[in-house]
Amino acid sequence: MRPPGLPESPHRSVLRPIGRATGCLLGFVPALIAGAGVCLVVAGLFSYVQPTSAGPASSPTSVPSVSIAPLTMPPLVSIAPSGSASVAAAVATRIVVPALNIDLPVVAPPPNEQFPLCNVAEYLVLSRPLAYPGLPQAVYLYAHARTNMFLPLLTQSETNNGAAMIGMWAEVYTADDQDHVYTITKVLPHVSGSAALESAASDTTNQLWLQTSEGPYESSTKVQVVAEPLGVIAATAADAHPTGKGNVCPDAPKCKTSNAGGCRP
């Protein structure tokens, strides 16, 4: 859980500064405020499955540079237009929000998850895994509101409803050594209930959704951050394959069933 005095959330069912491939971006990062941080859970809503095998990526082709306020992107190496069916179905492996010092591996949620893991972000699974950047569906990642996790999302959302996050970029690396770059366009604090997932579940435009909790209970409201795709940059294998796999949080609740994940035996 979060440190004492800060809310945290249990969960029952539901980038390091920019990598070497995008290190040149750092010179353009404005002095944005750091801040901002778990999981939206609706009993019986989620069906956990493993991601399909990643297909081969198309040959990269250069496209013109893209200028997006308040940052300027270098030339992008695009594997296909955003949402194109020719994009390989490669699973997300890492989430980075440079201005907030968020950099976490992304992993599949444990089977029968009762509580999210620590030191990683996990991807949401509904009728399908929401973990494939570049495809015509949302990518939905969640993590605890803890130091070195998604706590900055919560902290930032508590000032002017997170307005300072608008325009920051986020990066999602994938197993096929690509870096999908997004820009944050919307912050949704105080969301609750299954309706909070409807927009993400029905998205067909390759949005990125990040989620953390505003309180310590399953019923606690959540913060959602929505980002739109900018393009794709080629990444190194080292950047796209972080070694961390997460761990059961030391203060995680006791398991309710023998095959539950994320909880203590």
Image (spheres, rainbow, N blue to C red):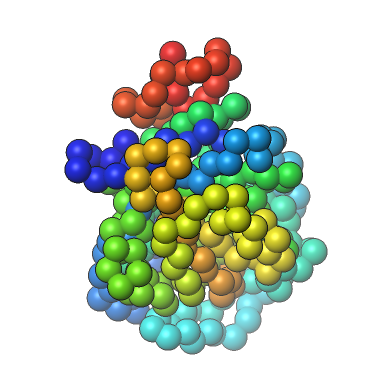
Can residue 74 be seen?
Answer: yes
* 67 to 84, vertically: above or below: below
Q: Nearer the viewer, residue 23 or 124?
A: 124
For image coordinates 42% across by 85% down, the residue present is: 69
* 78 to 111, vertically: above or below: below
**Which quadrant of the figure has residue 61?**
bottom right
Quadrant that contains the N terminus: top left
For image coordinates 24% across by 45% down, the residue present is: 6
For image coordinates 53% across by 79% down, the residue present is: 75
**Which quadrant of the figure has residue 243?**
top left
The image position of residue 195, as x and y in percent, is 60, 55
Can residue 236 be seen?
Answer: no
Q: Nearer the viewer, residue 158 or 53?
A: 158
The image position of residue 102, as x and y in percent, is 36, 55
Quadrant that contains the C terminus: top left
* 22 to 143, vertically: above or below: below
Residue situated furthest left in the rendering: 5
For image coordinates 56% across by 72% down, the residue present is: 228
The image position of residue 92, as x and y in percent, is 58, 50
The image position of residue 119, as x and y in percent, is 38, 39
Q: Nearer the viewer, residue 226 or 7?
A: 7
Mark count: 0
Residue situated furthest right in the rendering: 85
Q: Nearer the viewer, residue 173 or 51?
A: 51
